[in-house]
Image: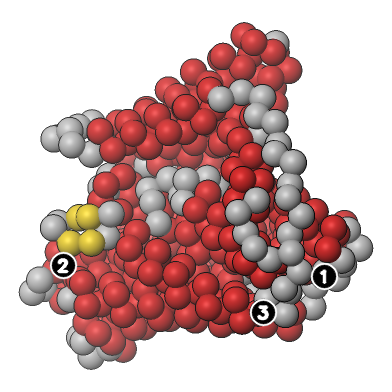
Amino acid sequence: MIPALTIFLLTYALMLVLSKYRHIVALAAAALYVALGILPVGKILPSVDFNVILMLAGTMAIVSLFIESGMPQRIADILLARTKNVCWAVVALALFAGFVSAFVDNVATLLIVAPVGLAISKKLNIPPVPVLIAIAVSSNLQGAATLVGDTTSILLGGYAKLDFLDFFFTRGKPGIFWAVELGALATVPVLLAVFREYRESVPKPRLAEVSDYFPTVLLVGLVGLLICASFIPNKPELTNGLICTALGVVGTARAAYKRGPSALGRVLREIDYVTLLLLGGLFIVIAGITEAGVIDAIGDIFVKLSAGSVFKIYTLLVFGSVLFSAFIDNIPYVATMLPVVTVISNELGVGSESVKMLLYFGLLSGATLGGNLTPIGASANITAIGILRREGYEVRVRDFMRIGVPFTLTAVLVGYVFIWFVWR
């Protein structure tokens, strides 16, 4: 077990230091586990969740076409036309970013909404830094709301065999969607307090042109088909992945037919191959440490630290995830912790299925929201800071945390209480 644990810790350290090459680090570690015989060759392919990878790839293609069509900008303009002042305009933009990120990658959501926030800031001569921070943290919040909202949600869905509707209701109880939405509502007073001084009226925006409505149809169709698939008993494990990939191929093929090979190249460039390769490597790494008994050992530590108390384990998992995700990427963290949660719930024994869902949802909520504590905790935060830097603005840590900390703690606490009382 010691060699497997050593490789795992070294892998994590290198992914932190070499963040641009974390996919290479993960793949190299995976190869090392196989080469040392820690993971048998025959278990390599079974350890990779191809359903998750196919879902991600297909969704990325559809989202690329959706953004290019101009529909998100049109929706944002319609939203702004119905706000009474800058304070409410910023809050509405943040909530809109949150809504979009429940179906679209967080960074993509930020890239959609950030230009609108910058435009408002320039027109009204207000600082854009808090505006873009509010948009970024709201984008991160809603990623856990649905199966396709974030990579971590897709990871949970694949691991726990959850369908699209399971995020709303599962096993006869409200799912994590409601915890996220209650958290989002609770953050509205926080944002209103932050932007309370901005009472200027908002100029009526000119509605953005929509070049193609078909990507919107594809996105709505994706959600509809995933919902329908939720009702299919004993469906093949690749069902959701094949749905996402098929619609992505249809959209890409249509774009190439209408606009030529350049459209095909653009969509293919927008797919995040780094994340796909990272996940492929991580699946094998986690299979390796599971095979070596590391996951069981980590689960034992959690149970001992909490003296077998479900409440203590749940609390430790939620707020520990918030803390870890404030500084490290939540994708490898969630991928590692999902099997740990299974071990913990099995060790607790009685009511393990209910406890398992309690801990799954606690892990996802803490890991998704924890990135909002610091400027480096989430990709959307880093992207927002990069946009502001290109515009000539520097974001100090205290500027970010002035919004990020109360926003995160409010949303986490509301979700924490809701999930506990529903699932325990």
Disc number placed over residue 196 in the picture, else none: 3
The location of residue 107, given as percent across then percent down, is 63, 51
Q: Is residue 34 visible?
A: no
Q: Which amino acid, mark 3?
A: Arg
* Image: 385 above or below 288: below
Residue shown at the point (61%, 45%) measured from the top left: 78
Locate residue 399: give its quadrant. bottom right
Residue shown at the point (47%, 80%) measured from the top left: 410
Which badge, 1 or 2, is on the more N-terminal residue?
A: 1
* Spatial separation of the CA atoms under disc 1 and disc 2: 47 Å
Residue shown at the point (61%, 17%) measured from the top left: 255
Locate residue 395: give its quadrant. bottom right
* Spatial separation of the CA atoms under disc 3 and disc 2: 42 Å
Which badge, 3 or 2, is on the more N-terminal residue?
A: 3
Q: Which amino acid, mark 2?
A: Ser
Which badge, 3 or 1, is on the more N-terminal residue?
A: 1
